[in-house]
C-alpha cells in the first residue's frame, strides 16, 4: 500500500535524477518578459507549448483565457477526481522581469539554467517558474505514489502579467469564479524567511506609491546671482520628506501608520528571527519604529521608503538653483491601514504645514491582505511541513513584499497559504537570479507531503 514516504521518495528521485532541472531549463528558455511588448508570443508559447502538455500528462483539462485588456493570456487547469474530496486552487506566473543580458556574472545566459555549486542560475528560477514547477512535480509524485489518484481535486491558474502588476487578474478570477471555486488556496512565490527555515505566509503587505513634485520654474538660475532670494525646490522637497519620516525611518504622520499589532500576530512572530547571511545586506542598527522587533517591523508594521529623487544633474552639476525637484516614495502597509486615505492625508498635511507648493499624487496602489490567523489550515500546513522536514516552519502573518493575494483571499473568499521555495538572497529582479539546490530538494518534499496530507483530509476538515 502506498504511503506518504513513497510520495516523498518519488519526488526526491525526480530531483536527484536531474529530471526536475531539465524541466526547469526548458521553462527558463522561454523569454517571457511581460514588460517587453515584443515578447507577447513567448508568453503565449510558454503556456501552450510547455505548460498545457505538462498538465495534460497529469490528467488536467486546460484552456487559455484571453486577457480582457489585451495583455498576456491566462491558463486554467482543472483536475476533478471526487466531488466529496477537498479542492485546492494553486497559482503561479509564467512572466519574468527583463533578462538583463550581459549583466550576469561570468557572462551567464539568463535564458538557460547554469549550475554553479549549490546555485542554479537563470531568469525565472526563483520568480516564479521554479516555484510553480516544484508544485507541479510534487503533484505528479503524489499521483504516481497513489496509483494514478491524488485523493483531492486540484485547479491551477497561471498568469503572464504578475511582473506588470497583475492588471486584470481580479477581473479574470471574478469572471471565472465558479470555475475556480475551491476549499483552499496553496501557492508559492517570494522568499522563505531564510534558506534554512521552511516558511508559511498568509498574505502580503500592500503598496502605495506617493509622488512628490516641486515645480517652481523652468530651467536653472545661477546660484551666485540668485542664491538667497529664489526658493530652491530640492531644499523644499527634502524638508517635506523629512516632515513625513525622520532620519531613522520612523513615520511621523499617523495616516501612514497601521493599527496596533495584535497579540495573535505578535505571538506568531515571537520565534521569527531576521538574520541575513554574510552575502545579504546586514540590518541597520536603530532603524525603524521603536519598540518593535525586526520581524515585527518587517511583517507587521508599515514603512515609508524613498525610492527615487531627482533635481538638477547629479553627473554634471551646474552652479545653478534647479527649477524642479521630484521624488517617488512608497508606503508598504499591512492589513488595517487606511491606505485609501493616504494620498489625500499626505497632501493635506504638507499643504497645511508650510509646503503648499508640493504637488502630491499617487500611483501603483495595491492592497494588503491575509488569511485569518485562527484558520485551522495554518496549523494543518505547519504540522505537515514539520512532519516532512523535522523543522518548525516560520509562520508569517504576511510577507514583506506584495503579491495578488487579495484576489484569492478577498475576491474568491479562500484561506490562503503561501509556501515559498526561494530565499532572500536569490537576486530575483536582478542579474544572477538563482535558486539553491538544497532548498529546492527540500521544497519538493514539503509540497509532496502537503499534497499527500491534503488527500488524507476530509473536505470539511
Image: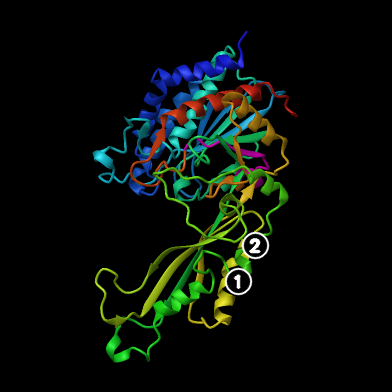
> Which of these two is toward me, 178 or 232?
232
Gap between marks 2 and 1, in whole Å?
10 Å
Question: Where does residue 345 sit, x and y in percent of width and height?
Answer: 60, 71
Element under disc 1: helix
Bounds of the magenta span? 407-422
Q: Position of residue 452 (x, y in %)?
A: 61, 21
Q: Residues within 10 Å of mark 1 (few under 14, many from 20)?
A: some
Q: Do the residues labelled 2 and 1 touch (CB within 8 Å)?
A: yes
**Any part of residue 245 in sight:** yes
Between residue 148 and residue 385, name the one nearer to us: 385
Give whichever of 283, 75 is nearer the camera: 283
Whether 228 is drawn above or below 408: the answer is below
- Side of 136 relative to 455 (left or right): left
Q: Does the magenta stretch include residue 406?
A: no
Of callouts 2 and 1, the N-terminal one: 2
Residue shown at 47%/37% (left/top)? 422
Reading the image, the residue beneath label 2 is 338
Residue at the far front: name it: 285
Vertical arrangement, residue 5 with respect to residue 388, above or below: above
**Disc 1 marks which residue?**
345
The figure's colour scheme reads: rainbow
Residue farthest toward the right in the current orientation of the protein: 460
Q: Where is residue 350 in the image (x, y as percent from the top left)?
A: 55, 77
Name of the residue lying farthest toward the top: 1
Name the residue nearer the viewer: 33 or 221.
221
Q: Could you tell me which secondary element the residue under label 2 belongs to?
A: loop
Q: In which quarter of the image is the C terminus?
A: top right
Q: In this view, does 360 lie to the left or right of 216?
A: right
What residue sits 29% from the left and 82% below the top? 320
Image quadrant in which the N terminus is located: top right
Image coordinates of residue 134 in percent, x first then y, are 48, 29
Amino acid at each position: 500500500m502506498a504511503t506518504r514516504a513513497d510520495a516523498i521518495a518519488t519526488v526526491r528521485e525526480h530531483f536527484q535524477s536531474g529530471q526536475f532541472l531539465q524541466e526547469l531549463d526548458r521553462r527558463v528558455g522561454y523569454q517571457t518578459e511581460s514588460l517587453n511588448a515584443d515578447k507577447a508570443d513567448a508568453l503565449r508559447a510558454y503556456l501552450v507549448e510547455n505548460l498545457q502538455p505538462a498538465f495534460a500528462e497529469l490528467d488536467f483539462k486546460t484552456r487559455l483565457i484571453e486577457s480582457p485588456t489585451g495583455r498576456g493570456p491566462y491558463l486554467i487547469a482543472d483536475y476533478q477526481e471526487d466531488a466529496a474530496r477537498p479542492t485546492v486552487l494553486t497559482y503561479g506566473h509564467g512572466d519574468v522581469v527583463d533578462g538583463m543580458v550581459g549583466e550576469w556574472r561570468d557572462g551567464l545566459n539568463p535564458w538557460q539554467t547554469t549550475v554553479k555549486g549549490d546555485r542554479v542560475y537563470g531568469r525565472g528560477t526563483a520568480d516564479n517558474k521554479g516555484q510553480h514547477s516544484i508544485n507541479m512535480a510534487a503533484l505528479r509524485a503524489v499521483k504516481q505514489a497513489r496509483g494514478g489518484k491524488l485523493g483531492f481535486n486540484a485547479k491551477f491558474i497561471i498568469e503572464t502579467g504578475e511582473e506588470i502588476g497583475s492588471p486584470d487578474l481580479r477581473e479574470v478570477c471574478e469572471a471565472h469564479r465558479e470555475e475556480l471555486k475551491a476549499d483552499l488556496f496553496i501557492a508559492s512565490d517570494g522568499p522563505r524567511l531564510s534558506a534554512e527555515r521552511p516558511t508559511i505566509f498568509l498574505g502580503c503587505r500592500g503598496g502605495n506609491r506617493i509622488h512628490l513634485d516641486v515645480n517652481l520654474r523652468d530651467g536653472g538660475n545661477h546660484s551666485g546671482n540668485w542664491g538667497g532670494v529664489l526658493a530652491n525646490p530640492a531644499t523644499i522637497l527634502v524638508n517635506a520628506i523629512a516632515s513625513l519620516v525622520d532620519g531613522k525611518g520612523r513615520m511621523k504622520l499617523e495616516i501612514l501608520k497601521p493599527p496596533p499589532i495584535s497579540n495573535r500576530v505578535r505571538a506568531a512572530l515571537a520565534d521569527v528571527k531576521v538574520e541575513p547571511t554574510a552575502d545579504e545586506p546586514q540590518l541597520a542598527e536603530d532603524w525603524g519604529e521603536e519598540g518593535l522587533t525586526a520581524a515585527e517591523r518587517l511583517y507587521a508594521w508599515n514603512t515609508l521608503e524613498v525610492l527615487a529623487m531627482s533635481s538638477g544633474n547629479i553627473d554634471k552639476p551646474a552652479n545653478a538653483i534647479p527649477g524642479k525637484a521630484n521624488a517617488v516614495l512608497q508606503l508598504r502597509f499591512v492589513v488595517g491601514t487606511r491606505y485609501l486615505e493616504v494620498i489625500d492625508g499626505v497632501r493635506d498635511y504638507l499643504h497645511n504645514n508650510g509646503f503648499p507648493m508640493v504637488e502630491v499624487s499617487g500611483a501603483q496602489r495595491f492592497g494588503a491582505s491575509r488569511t485569518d490567523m485562527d484558520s485551522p489550515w495554518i496549523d494543518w500546513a505547519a504540522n505537515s511541513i514539520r512532519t516532512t522536514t523535522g523543522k518548525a516552519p516560520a509562520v508569517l502573518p504576511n510577507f514583506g513584499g506584495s503579491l495578488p493575494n487579495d484576489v484569492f483571499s478577498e475576491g474568491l473568499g479562500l484561506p490562503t497559504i503561501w509556501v515559498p521555495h526561494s530565499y532572500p538572497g536569490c537576486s530575483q529582479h536582478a542579474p544572477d537570479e538563482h535558486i539553491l539546490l538544497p532548498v529546492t530538494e527540500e521544497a519538493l518534499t514539503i509540497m509532496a507531503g502537503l499534497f499527500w496530507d491534503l488527500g488524507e483530509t476530509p473536505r470539511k476538515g
